[in-house]
Image: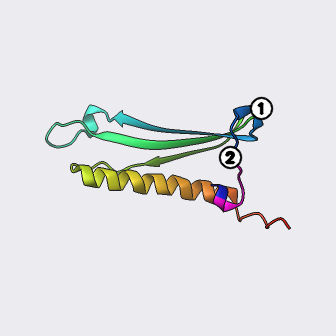
């Protein structure tokens, strides 16, 4: 994120202008949406909430669903694709890089 030229990471939350809350949640879907073999279906989701540090107001909330998969290698790939999609959304919100300071 620092490489985008729009953010500077700080060591203490009190020094920040924005707070990025990042979480991965896995929901089990309702019985009607279970797989044909009666195994439960899951909906893993990345959630990023961007808040103003001073007011704690939510400025943006982004959610990206990760496709489920039987094989671990495919779950890993789907996880990374979902994470990349969330990062791309945050980058679009951030806008173009700030001009370099002289």
Q: Nearer the viewer, residue 61 or 32?
A: 61
Magenta stretch holds residue 7: yes
Residue that appears at 61% across and 53% down: 90
Q: Residues within 10 Å of mark 2 (few under 14, many from 20)?
A: few
* Secondary element at image label 2: loop
Q: Earlier in the sequence, mark 1 or mark 2?
A: 2
Q: Residue at x 46, y 52 (%)?
A: 83
**Image coords of residue 33 (percent x, y):** 27, 39
The residue under the point 71% across, 52% down is: 7
Mark 1 or 2, closer to the camera: 2
Report, in whole angstroms, how far the alpha carbon at label 1 lies from the one at label 2.
Answer: 19 Å
The kind of secondary structure element at disc 1 is: loop
Is the Cβ of the residue at disc 1 closer than 8 Å to that at disc 2? no
Specify the quadrant of the image occupied by residue 29. top left
- Residue 66 rendering spot, x and y as whole percentages: 39, 49
Residue 9 numbered mark, or none: 2
Quarter placement of the N terminus: bottom right
Q: Is residue 83 left or right of residue 8?
A: left
* Residue 31, position as x, y percentages in the image: 26, 32
- Residue 65 has which mark? none
As drawn, 10 above or below 85: above
Q: Main secondary structure of the magenta part?
A: loop
Dividing the picture into quarters, in which one does residue 37 lie?
top left
Disc 1 marks which residue?
55
> Does the segment drawn in magenta span residue 34?
no
Q: Which residues are magenta?
A: 3-9
Q: In the image as oriented, which residue stretches furthest toward the left?
A: 37
Viewer-proximal residue among 5 and 58: 5
Query: Is 92 left, or right, of 26 in this rendering?
Result: right
């Amino acid at each position: 994120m620092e490489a985008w030229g729009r953010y500077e990471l700080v060591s203490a939350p009190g020094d920040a202008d924005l707070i990025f809350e990042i979480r991965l949640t896995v929901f089990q879907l309702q019985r009607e949406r279970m797989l044909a073999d009666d195994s439960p279906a899951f909906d893993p989701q990345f959630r990023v909430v961007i808040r103003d540090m001073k007011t704690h107001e939510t400025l943006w909330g982004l959610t990206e669903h990760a496709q489920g998969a039987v094989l671990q290698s495919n779950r890993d790939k789907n996880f990374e694709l979902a994470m990349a999609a969330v990062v791309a959304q945050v980058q679009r919100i951030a806008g173009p890089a700030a001009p370099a300071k002289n």
